Amino acid sequence: MNLDQLKQYTKDFSAIPISINFAMPDFDPIAVTQRFDQPDAPCFLLTGKPKQQEDGYSFIGLNPTLTITYRNGVLTRSDEQGNVSHETTDLKPVLERILADNRMPKLKHMPPFSGGLVGYFSYDYARYATTADLPAVSDPMKLNDVDLLLINRVIAYNHTTKMVTLIQVIPADQLTTQYESVMSSLTDLKDEIMQVHKQQPLPPFTMTPFKLQFSLCEFEEKVAEAKHHIVDGDIFQVQLSNPQHSKMTGSLFAATPTLFKESPSPYQFYFRHNDFETIGASPETMITKRDNTLFTYPLAGTRRRGKNQLEDDAFADELQHNPKELSEHNMLIDLGRNDLGSISQFGSVKVTAYRNLLKFSNVMHMGSVVESKVDPDVSSIDIIHSLLPAGTLSGAPKISAMQIIGELENNKHGLYGGCLGYLGFDGDLDMCIGIRLAYRKGDDLVVRSAAGIVADSIPKHEYQEFNNKARAIVTALQETAAKGGVCDALSNR
């Protein structure tokens, strides 16, 4: 949109997005991220096709104007001038004020994300989203509960139309004075991007062998305790996780080409801030908001992929007719409906897809879709508070399951089981569930996966599920370490 067209929005909105578009059939999101990445600065790349009814996109956030971390009730802010502040406060009103101060119009033909807050809310942030008493757990890695970047310059790529959109969000009262200089800056950025045709050599990466935290014997004891809670009526189901630990050197970014190529998923991401780094290929949406519609996509029921078509079909048939898996899936659909119900217009919550078979590189799941119309008085942070963590990563009833998880596991989950994505200045949001990922803090590397425990769970089968769910990310890391950081081109992706 030109200057005159944008001026009509300055009375009603505090921020305005200025953008340019151009075609680039050979756009490589990893190579473009490399071109603009500064190793000591934050980095954000989100790519994939989360919704069948939407085009697939890649989003790259450049030069955050503000970074926000939250840990144990302490908010830390750092601006682009390097000013750092620490404050003990509630996070919710701070984030709501930032989004309100940068509220911008949702313009036609713009990408789903054009600027906003990007990053993650951890599983452990749930303690701030509820008044329920959740047990204190150990935190040897000193993990943040929230890590967000304020992004007002975005590179967006539409994988269907092969079009790049460059966006710069500016204060509405500066539109007239800044428009020409912003357009010039975006044109310079376009020229730089048009010169990027292949990846550079990837950073080196090494790791020690992974080791599961809980042995099969220890896990069997935890399953037995969980079953006691089920018999006592405390819960119907609980998700017990088993982290794998390793030591690493280098950067997880080196594994992006391998993971993204070998594990096509609705959400593929890389995020780095300070000494924290994560990479993942998540199959599951926690929550999406488009205009006034909310979507959540419960996945429950898992089988590994078969070695051939006959075995694959047999696993799929068994999954879709297994009473335990069907019961668990229905229970988690109900949990998703309850979560949406608390933030939606009365009577608007509906199941619009039911128990579809979804196949990924190493596993298959049953997936459903729950939709609703959001209550107009609900904020983006209210939505996060209502859904986090997803029932598929906690259990049912959710609060009781989380209390039992804290007692049995006694360690912070971090991003695993939380959510990662964006909260747009235009009011939309899209957050995937933090699964099928690796994260590191310093040189400590973690891959975590969970198994859903019900009354008739067989511990040794559930224990194997850890490896099935973690296989894609573990394999990608191992292959990357074996290459020693050699570039694996993805220009024809």
Image (tube, rainbow, N blue to C red):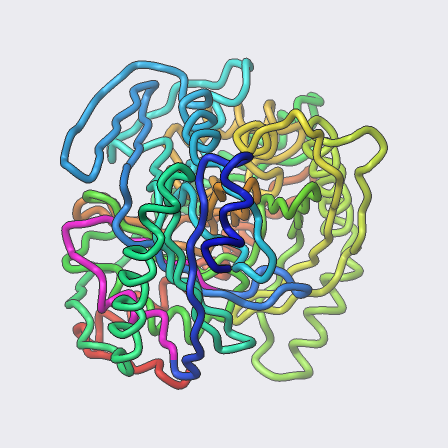
Residue 467 vs 83, above or below: the answer is: below
Magenta region: 27-47
Q: Is residue 29 magenta?
A: yes
184 and 474: which is toward the camera: 184
Q: Which is more toward the observer, 19 or 33?
A: 19
Task: Residue 436: say if magenta.
Answer: no
> How far across and how far down the image is residue 19, in percent?
43, 60
Q: Which residue occupies the foreground of this view, 127 or 76?
A: 76
Nearer the observer, 410 or 110: 110
Q: Position of residue 24 (x, y in %)?
A: 41, 80
Q: Residue at x 44, y 79 (%)?
A: 23
Residue 186 visible at all: yes
Query: Which quarter of the rendering shows the C terminus?
Result: bottom left
Kindly identify the residue that appears in the image at 62 percent across and 32 percent down: 227
| Rendered residue at 37%/31% (across/down) | 145
**Location of residue 33 by image quarter:** bottom left
- Residue 148 lies, in percent from the top left, at 35, 39
Q: Quadrant of residue 161?
A: bottom right
Residue 300: x and y in percent read 66, 51
Up the image or down, 89 lies above or below 71; here it is: above
Location of residue 134 with respect to 242 vertically, above or below: above
Q: Quadrant of residue 201?
A: bottom left
- Residue 471 visible at all: no
Would you say 388 lies left or right of 340 here? left
Side of 84 relative to 471 (left or right): left
Residue at 39% across, 28% down: 410
